[in-house]
Image: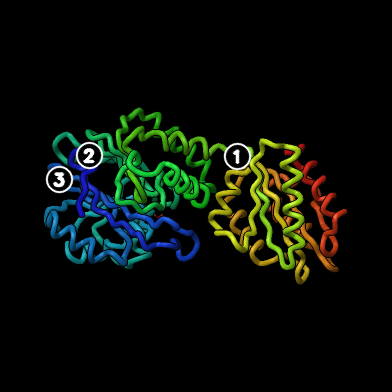
Amino acid sequence: MIRHVKGNVHWVGKTDWELKKFHGSEYSTHRGSTYNSYLVREGKTALIDTVWAPFAKDFVDNLEAEVGLGSIDLVVQNHAEVDHSGSLPELLRRRPGLPVYCTANAVKSLKGHYHEDWNFQVVKTGDSVELGNGKQLVFVEAPMLHWPDSMFTYLAGEAVLFPNDAFGQHYASEFLFNDEVDQDELWAECVKYYANILTPFSPLVAKKIKEVVALNLPVEVIAPSHGIIWRKDPLQIVTQYAEWAADYREDRVAILYDSMWDGTRHLAEAIAKGVSQASPSTDVRVHNVAKTDKNDVITEVFKAKAVLLGSPTINHGILHSMAGLVEQMKGLKFKGKKGGSFGTYGWSGESVKQLGASLRDCGFEVLDEGFAALWEPDAGVLASAFEYGKSLATRL
Ligand code: FEO
């Protein structure tokens, strides 16, 4: 269904209420998502991005029914990942020869995905397309935000920015705009999205924001490719991204563990109480990683100033849930955070040392050699774990 955004800009995307996993199973989408596509109808009509392949036929049928495929003069493909380009094959099968404006890297990516040689019009930063009626599409390359091919498109004359994945959220809603939705839900999805997708690119986020702000362009609407559209105080999400990009941390400690017979859990809880007693204002969160959504865990890591990892020793190593978490943390390149490790063991006891080494690999400042306990912790060991937590709190 075509929905009005601003001026002659309309949303023609797909709301995917059913989506619970994205990027395969790498990203949980508790609240579904949307694939936003926009139609700009001036002297020329431009379609900005498309929707994911499973919805391609409906998407193109809807365009045909509501505006007529023959009325579309050009497509802008801000980013080639299939959730945005997945309808191009169907669209271009029915409108062969339609020009596709995208970056040089997007041509490589689109050819790699679809093995088609469409009518690509390669653009770079500062290039533009006149749409008539005083409106112009201006392109700004945004490499690694979050793929090499990513770009932003700005609609001059209407002050609408189409930044594709940037400033988005995986959040399905029948509302279209930021001022209409539940603010707690909206911001929870924004921070999860940043933490899990954009963290490794934070230096580039900061640089791109400075570059775009320096252009001094009016921005009245920010229309990303996922989730709601920012029309009320649209720059609030840009300001928030600048803060998140600056080695973000709150006065929080995340204690993340897995446990076989509860020994490591008992340590986690004792350490948490110690941290909390020594620093009552610190928000201490304790999660069993094997029982908690992995992307929600990463969001906790993103918010925390310190992360303590716990695992018992198994087969000279750590539990696989913790290994998965460490792999995620390594790729996301968190900066400016402190870390520690703990765990129980019955004989060889390598887990605490290994978790400390992993935290160093992930770029964390590891505070000490960690807290290891032989067998199930008794009252004395738990008291020591409590004291260890208190001691950690003074070093965070
Ligand atoms: Fe929403 Fe990078 O795709």
Q: At numbered mark 1, what does the secondary structure look like: helix, strand or loop?
A: loop
Distance in Å between CA atoms under marks 3 and 1: 46 Å
Give x and y (percent) for residue 326. 64, 58
Callout in the foreground (3, 1): 1
Q: Gap between marks 2 and 1, in whole Å?
A: 36 Å
Looking at the image, can residue 216 be seen? yes
Q: Are marks 3 and 2 in contact (CB under 8 Å)?
A: no
Q: Which residue is mark 3?
A: 44
Residue furthest to the bottom: 315
Q: Amino acid at mark 3?
A: Lys
- How crowded pointer 1 is (Cα within 10 Å; few <14, some 14-19, many 20+) is rated as some
Taking the spot 51% from the left edge, 46% from the top edge, the residue there is 201
Within-10-Å neighbours for mark 3: few <14, some 14–19, many 20+: some
Query: First in sequence: mark 3 or mark 1?
Result: 3
Which residue is disc 2 drawn over?
6
Residue 377: image quadrant is bottom right
The answer to which of marks 3 and 2 sits earlier in the sequence is 2
Q: Is residue 110 above or below residue 243?
A: below
